[in-house]
Image: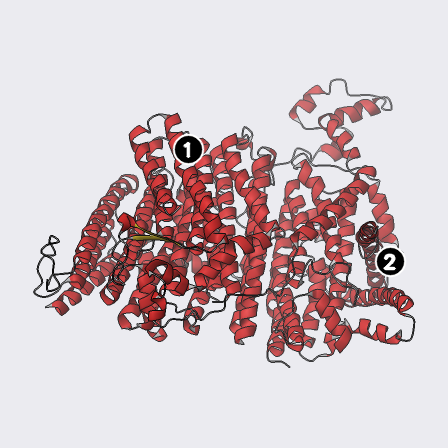
Amino acid sequence: MTHYPILAIMAYFLGAFLIVIFGRNRAVRNTLGFLGTAVPLCLLIMLAKPILANGEIIAYWMGNRVPAGGYAIGIALEVDAFGLFFGLLIATAVFVAMIYSFSYMSHDDNEPQYYTLFLMLCGGVMGLVLSGDLFNMFIMVEILTFAAVALTAFRNTVFGALEAAFKYLVVGCIGSTCILAGTIMLYAQAHTLNFAQLAAFLPGNLNIATIIAYALLFIGFCTKAFLVPFHPLAADAHGAAPAPVSVLISGVLTKSGLYGIIRLTYILFRTMNLGTVQFWLVFLGSVSMFLCVTMALAQHDFKRLLAFHSISQIGYVLTAAGLATALGVSSGLYHAMNHTLFKGLLFLCAGAVLHETGTTDLDRLGGLSKKMPVTTVLFLVGAFSISGIPPFNGFASKWLIYQATYQKAVESGNIGFMLVTVCCLVTSTLTLASFVKVTQSVFFGQLPKEYEHVKEVPFGMRLGMGILAALCILTGIFPGFVQNWLTGPAARAVFQANGYIDAMMGAGYADKFGLADTLPVSFTSVGVWSPISWLCLLAIMLLAVAIVAITSKYDAVSKAAKQTDPLTLEALESATAAYLPTAPANPAPRYATGHAASGKYELFFGGEESVFSQVGGDDLFWGFKHNWRHYFKFMHELHSGIVNDYSLWAVVALALAMLYAMIIL
Amino acid sequence: MTIVLDSLRYLAYILIFPGFLFCFLTGMLLCGIDRKLVARMQKRIGPPVLQPFYDFFKLLGKETIVPAAANRVVFLAAPLVGLAAQVVLQLFIPVFSFSAFRGVADVIVVLYLLLIPALSVILGAASSGSPYAGVGLSREMVTILAVELPLVLVLLAVAKTVGNAMGTGLCFSLSQIAEYQAANGSLITRLSMLPAVAAMLLIIPGETGNHPFDAAEAETEICEGMLAEYSGAPLAVYKLSHAVKLLTMTSLFVALFLGGIGGAVEHLLVGLAPAIAGGLAIVIEIIILFLLCIVLVALCCSLVHAVTARLRIEQLFKYYWTVVAGLALISVVLAWYGL
Amino acid sequence: MILLNYIASFFLITLGLYCIVTKYDLMKSVIGLSIMDYGVNLLIITVGFNPGGTAPIFTFGELNPDSFFVDPIPQALTLTSIVIGACVTAMSLSLVIKLKEMYGTTDTHEIRRLRG
């Protein structure tokens, strides 16, 4: 069992290399890709029982170089409940994305390269979350950044793909360099790169060098999670990349950044009991949450809109994680999980639309629900989930986050946290608004002529989306299960840094440094929400209403009307012909053109041949945007698309983080 | 045996009181009273109070037309889902001390359950493919956005006030809020709650889409907006949903701010035998609730309807996010510092 | 001597960042990235440097408590970091080539189709 983590990471990389060698043949390639993602998933699921249920921690020393004399020499993998939680998320998401890719990418050139990069990215992220060594983590960060950049530019003829990749590369490399510089500064102080040893050493040694290193690492991981000053990169990269890659970038890559931030602040530095750090994280999270949701409202590209929402949801997670309460971390992790599921689903739906229509422009699409009913239903599941509509999973986690923030406000007596609650709630409604916009302008409304030929996507793609949709519903209906078996243990692991240190470095190691776990682990939730009961009630009520509706012939009349619909005029005329003194001699040409040019029924049918009048997405929320027009104008000008500006934001964020870190001292 | 009785009891809750039948009758009556009052205020005679019932049954008998551009399933299913969700929501709002289903949903959940009926209208409208519906749904969504912020603040203020008094710091459970008020008097009597009460009174017409805030329906400019393509039975169901929403919002107000009356009623009946007192209390409470709902409808819907003209959608948004949200925020701050 | 190294490395990192932020040319951005990498590499080497230490190459027989040598780990890290830096340069240059083909310019103010 101790070998499972390394095998999980190796499976991805091995799959990548084998695809380079044997990947010319499609069957071989797909088999390798499937195995490469399915094997790690199985391995991690097998780890779930000992780690999540029993609370064990796996410490694996590569080459069996165990610590000697209190110093960790070898490179370690360490898997606690927190790491495994993210590992499971990632494995699930990449597995689904891989299944989806088989159909989705089948028309692209260079498929072997795609799968190689895909698996490299997966391996990088998996290595990052299972790693117990800071430099190893940096290597994984670089691997996943390169793979993500290459995949962003994969369809390099797509509008803006190269540009997005370049911007991502430049700012991503600034972030990676920050991580490297922070790593090396920690090494200079602690002479170790092992997490456990650092976690033992650092809390007692917060000096100017370590705190600057903290700021550097923090900004580095912010880049990976695309938090606020880095959010334009996410929007560009998600928009240009193929859909399964967008799933990876938003569902998986951002999680690695979040993982880094939480690991850093809770376990390595244990600074979360400081009000300043809590404020920093919550502030950053709230700003990301609100700013990105408003940016999303202004978008008119499907995937770009989703990308901004992605960062908005990451903001929720960071806000909750920054509360430093058990409920906060638990709900944050719950939302991180849900984000992976519903955002993956939504990106796959966007991919399905792109696959069939060739565009993701909200202003050009419309009325696809009749052509792609399954995709529409799955999209609605995702959209309801992300907007936090009960009983889907987004609601369950957001509801916990509202409580966590409000409870924090009450406990700390700080009214600022209550404003965060309000911000969360309003952001959630804004999210709903922008998904209403997508629903209206892509799936409902009128179907443009050019998409008459569109059909439903192939089974492989529907399967991928279906798995995620089912998970969205299940995790929403059983919040208790998720909390007890997934997020609860993970949150406990976050708070038990001493256990983590002891598991790696031998029992009693943490005590030598006189560290105590200061933050409370248990929590009670004040709210009441029982999705099952609500669903039962709704089902009974719906049944009752439906029975009444059906017995009162709710749509019986309309069925008859529909059958005669194309013939209404003819039927009417023939029916009334007997009463008319002179029936039209040869009415056929008039029906053929669809215009009832003259006669008695012009009044009723003259307007029937309606012009195409889709209400596009761009201006849908004018009433809202008008009041915020200065803000939107400012934001539009701010996101100039110039790589230098984004780099400048990164530098400014870095400088601010360093300055703020001085306050922590 | 008890299981059968229990399930029968719950079925009665769902279908009769406070569920479907109660919602249907009182909602429609409230609607009729509203129309009558508006008419009287405008020196018209107005329709009979039972007119909504006549309309409802007449619409049921009319032909249902599904537009050619519409997605048929969504178009027809949306009204039913909306109605069901609306009625289920009513089950969670306590009638003074009586709550049919406790432990299912708290204040925040109710806030989101309020979105489901609105969302189903929006989806139904979107699926109809009509440009009027498109404009209507955009306005409806903006209205929801506008109302959401003050409503959230009001609910948080109430949660904080009750939580302060109970010593837990915050209280999200509606039945606990009701019980607290039954024991300690209505929240409306508190100084800190007065701005929240005012805000809530302004939220009711916004949430139910009543006159100055009905940009989403705006008969005179966008032909009832979202309902433009609806006819026959689905339209009837929508009208019913709307009527039930009137009841939901007013009874939510009563549950949040006027819960103390339930305590007064029980106090009044304290001399009677418990079995009779319990039954009698419920009956009296229902009557009081209904009367209060009428008063609230008269105050926030009919009066406001009669004296104001429709706001444009961006004015509506601005109004809610400045005036109403400001009022609610004052209340939150007052509650926060324990006034 | 060591202090000068630290100053130089931070100067290089800052110079690289300055170059990325202020130079409106893709090639110069790439050069900035490289400079930044060199700065970090210098930092790593400096951290592991012990004045007067020998190269950390020993057999087990030679190793005794009095051995005085520079820290080998940062050197290993530097090697990795250099490789990664080379990758960054290669990757970004290939992107620049494609961008030049597609946009016909390397001016960053022209390459801003994705914005807002």
Q: Is residue A606 above or below residue A530?
A: above
Q: Nearer the viewer, residue A466 or A190?
A: A190
Of the residues tagged 1 and 2, which is closer to the observer?
A: 1
- Name the spot of residue A170 as percent of width and height, x first: 29, 52
Q: For residue A105, which numbered disc appears in the image?
A: 1
Left or right, A168 with respect to A400, comes to left
Circle 2: is it few (<14), some (14-19), or many (20+) Cα within 10 Å? some
Disc 2 chain ID: B
Left or right, B140 with respect to A505, comes to right
Q: Quadrant of the C terminus of chain A?
A: bottom left
Residue at the location (50% across, 32% down)? Answer: A460
Is residue A630 visible to the viewer in this orientation of the structure?
A: no
* Residue at disc 1, secondary structure: loop
Outermost residue, bottom side? B339
Q: For residue B46, which numbered disc appears in the image?
A: 2
Residues under labels 1 and 2: Cα distance?
A: 65 Å
- Residue type indicated by callout 1: Met
Is residue A327 visible to the viewer in this orientation of the structure?
A: yes
Disc 1 chain ID: A
Left or right, B177 with respect to A386, comes to right
- Name the spot of residue B299 as percent of width and height, x first: 78, 68
- Can you tell which quarter of the image residue C102 is in? top left
- Residue type indicated by callout 2: Gly
On the same chain, marks 1 and 2? The answer is no
- Name the spot of residue A72 as percent of width and height, x first: 27, 59
